[in-house]
Every structure is written in C-alpha cells, then in structure tokens.
C-alpha cells in the first residue's frame, strides 16, 4: 500500500516504519510509517507536581516509586526516547500545566488545594505603575539611564525562587498594576528525640 502523494506528500525527512500491536485482524502484522520531518515527540506534564518529590501527587500520599501504574514510571522510558530523538529532525515539544500569573484561569479547587498542602508560602506583590513596563524573558526592564544600579531586588527574588520554589517567579502588568508572584517551599526541620 502506498500513500497517495496528494494526501501524504513527498517525504521531506527520513521515513520511519514501526510495527504496531493494534492490528485489524489477530495475527496480522501492521506498520505505521512516519516522515521524521513531519513528526513530533510530545512530552506532557513532566513536572514536579505530577512526578516529583514534594509535588502535589507526592504530598497527597500517592505512591511515587517507579513501578507500573505510578506517575514516576514514565520517567525512564521518556528519557530513553528523548535520547533517541535528540539529534534527529524530529521535533520535541514539552508541555506543562500553567496558569495566568493572577490565577484567574485556575479552577478554585486547584487554588484551594495548593494553599492547604505542603509547606508552601505564596507571595503576591502588587504595585501601581504608570507608563509602559517592558518585560523580557520574564524580567522587567528598567527605564533608568544607569541600568547597572537597578534590578538588585528583582534578581534577589529570582534567586530565592530558583532555590526554594522551582524557579516559579512570574511578573505581569495589567490595568496599571505590576504583579509579582511566587511560591516558596520550605522543608520542615526533622524532629529530634528532644522534640518528641
């Protein structure tokens, strides 16, 4: 069977032929062909909340061992696949769950869940601003003439977010209000015999 050129088009990459288990009739061998230049490996939600220590799944008490049926079980196969795909013309796309900085698009139950689990402190700072604020790569740009003498506070906040909050600091400007938000996770100190 050949794909008609009007449907599939001429290959622009390498043709990859894979045997698949889902055959129309038992015992048949079926294959799928992909043009590497028109193929993407999509990696969804590989983030701490779903498969890392201290994330939501872990804090809720779910099994985080790498055995079948757990979220962490996907990590090693994904690593192997990424290693095989990197260096080819196959695109790699990572997605993650995210929300607007003010969480206006987050369901209430997620906001509430996040506030009541774990040892997390949520910081939200709002200041009125006038004029245009330029944000490049998540960093507000100063309009001062001597740029070397500004931005120390923001850089300190970025370091704290990287160290204690998985680098989750976000900034935004909306309706004349500059908003900075971050979540900081703190571990509880271990109890000693004297604390008991």
Image (tube, helix red, strand yellow):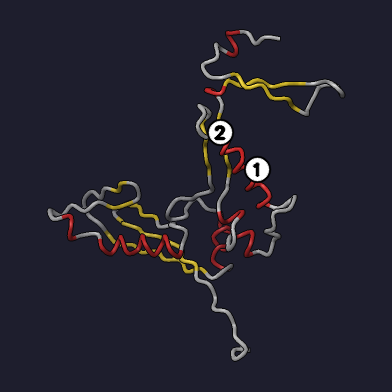
**Image location of residue 190, percent across then percent down:** 57, 79
| Quadrant of the snapshot with the N terminus | top right
**Image location of residue 61, percent across then percent down:** 68, 64
Residue in view at x 58 percent, y 67 percent: 117
Q: Give 5 or 92, whichever is nearer the viewer.
A: 92
Q: Is residue 68 left or right of residue 145?
A: right
Q: In the rendered image of this protein, does residue 63 appear above or below residue 46?
A: below
Q: Is residue 33 left or right of residue 135?
A: right
Residue 52, by quadrant, is bottom right
Q: Give 7 or 155, whichever is nearer the viewer.
A: 155
Residue in view at x 73 percent, y 25 percent: 19
Secondary element at image label 1: helix
Q: In the rendered image of this protein, does residue 182 appear above or below residue 175?
A: below
> According to the image, label 2 marks what residue?
85
Residue in view at x 69 percent, y 22 percent: 32
> According to the image, label 1 marks what residue?
77
Residue 155, by quadrant, is bottom left
Q: Residues within 10 Å of mark 2 (few under 14, many from 20)?
A: some
| Quadrant of the snapshot with the C terminus | bottom right
């Amino acid at each position: 069977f050949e794909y008609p050129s009007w449907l599939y088009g001429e290959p622009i990459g390498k043709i990859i032929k894979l045997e698949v288990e889902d055959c129309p009739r038992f015992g048949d061998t079926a294959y799928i062909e992909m043009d590497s230049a028109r193929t993407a490996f999509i990696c969804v939600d590989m983030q701490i909340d779903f498969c890392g220590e201290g994330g939501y799944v872990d804090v809720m008490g779910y099994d985080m061992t790498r055995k079948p049926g757990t979220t962490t079980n996907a990590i090693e196969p994904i690593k192997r696949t990424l290693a095989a795909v990197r260096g080819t013309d196959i695109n790699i796309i990572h997605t993650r769950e995210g929300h607007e900085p003010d969480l206006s698009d987050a369901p209430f139950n997620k906001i509430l869940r996040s506030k009541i689990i774990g040892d997390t402190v949520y910081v939200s700072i709002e200041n009125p601003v006038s004029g245009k604020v330029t944000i490049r790569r998540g960093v507000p740009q100063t309009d001062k003439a001597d740029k070397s003498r500004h931005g120390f506070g923001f850089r300190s906040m970025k370091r704290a977010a990287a160290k204690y909050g998985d680098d989750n600091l976000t900034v935004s400007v909306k309706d004349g209000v500059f908003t900075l938000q971050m979540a900081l996770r703190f571990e509880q100190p271990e109890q000693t015999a004297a604390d008991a």
